[in-house]
Image (spheres, rainbow, N blue to C red):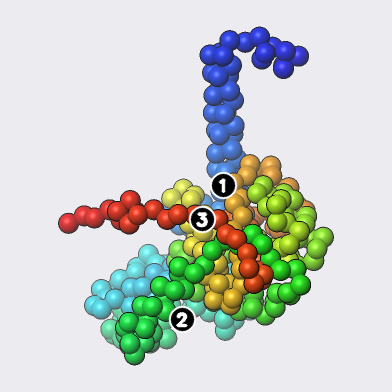
Amino acid sequence: MKTLVKRHLPTRVLNSWKTMQTGLTNTREALLDAKRHRVYGGPGEGSFDSSWTGRQLETQLTKDYHRVEKGLALREPKRPFGAEVEKRLRVGLSTLAAGTAGPITYGSFAESALTALQSWNAGGAADPRVALPVVRDDVLRQANSSEARTILFDDFFTSRRSIRDFDSSLNVDIADIEAAVALATNTPSVCNRQAFRVHMYTGKQAVTSVLSQQNGNAGFRNSIPVVLVVTVDARLFSGASERNQRWIDGGLFAMTLGWALHSRDLGTCFLNWSMKNSESDALRSSAGIAAHEDIVTLIAVGIPPKSFKVARSPRRQIDEVLVRHA
């Protein structure tokens, strides 16, 4: 009946109907995104108190211990500083369950940051365990020859291509993927929260199940030996101002992971996950991904054959990308 009605509607009316439907769908998806952030994200530090637990507590303590780290890393830190930060650290640490503040947990980092903040404000001594002293060469890793260094990095960045043809006779060494993920954990994230996660699927059935829910890989799906799903833990973001931050952090991590995989001589193809909430729910359910994780992208990983083709993918000119301000 709906089809018959549409066939007899004027083109102008039909186009208006389609536009309205698109607008309603966009609004619905935006509302569902907002609901996810409200359900899983923290309410914001303005309402922080001793009732916060779990990931919400971790989020606030991490934000505040990193504020201490950043403050003490300045050339000339203020003294005193961080009164509100100190209050929140005290409250948060007092609510941690016994044993939570172990040697490598956010609790231990919060404890050492609180001690460092108090020490600085009291006597002006910056704790080197919190504000790490380094030299320039340790950070920039400068090579002996600037020309050689330039050529090395130019070749690295210009040689990576999206690969849609993998050699099924060559097995991917999972140790290489683990090493790449370890490298990618160096990605910067808001207040060092490191909300990113990677789900790895290697069995034929699991790989096919995941890939069948993404549009754009049907032509080379059977040759993909490994697929990674990059997600972020939505519980590690709080307040209205961080409603989009999880996508920024997740995107940065995914990009770094792509380069890290490239450094291990693995071919990759980023598979776009521009899906409705219902489709993300379906993938989470079928692929064993927790409800509080937002899906950022999928990455096909494998080893290409000796000879293969890639898309031309021309790059924009630099003047189209770089906007100069005097």
Which residue has dot 1 on it?
38
Going from the N terminus, do you reach mark 2 or mark 3 first?
2
Badge 1 marks a residue whose secondary structure is helix
Q: Amino acid at mark 1?
A: Arg
Crowd band around label 3 with a 10 angstrom C-alpha radius: few (<14), some (14–19), many (20+): few
**Mark 2 → mark 3, Cα distance in angstroms:** 52 Å
Count the numbered circles shown.
Answer: 3
Residue at image point 57% right, 29% down: 22
Which residue has dot 2 on it?
112
Residue at image point 72% right, 13% down: 4
Of residue 298 and residue 294, the one placed in the foreground of this image is 298
Of residue 108 and residue 217, the one placed in the foreground of this image is 217
Which residue has dot 3 on it?
312
* Nearer to us: label 2 or label 1: 1
Work out whether residue 126 can be spotted.
no
**Residue 74 location, x and y as percent?**
29, 76
Residue 2 occupies quadrant: top right
Q: Amino acid at mark 2?
A: Ser
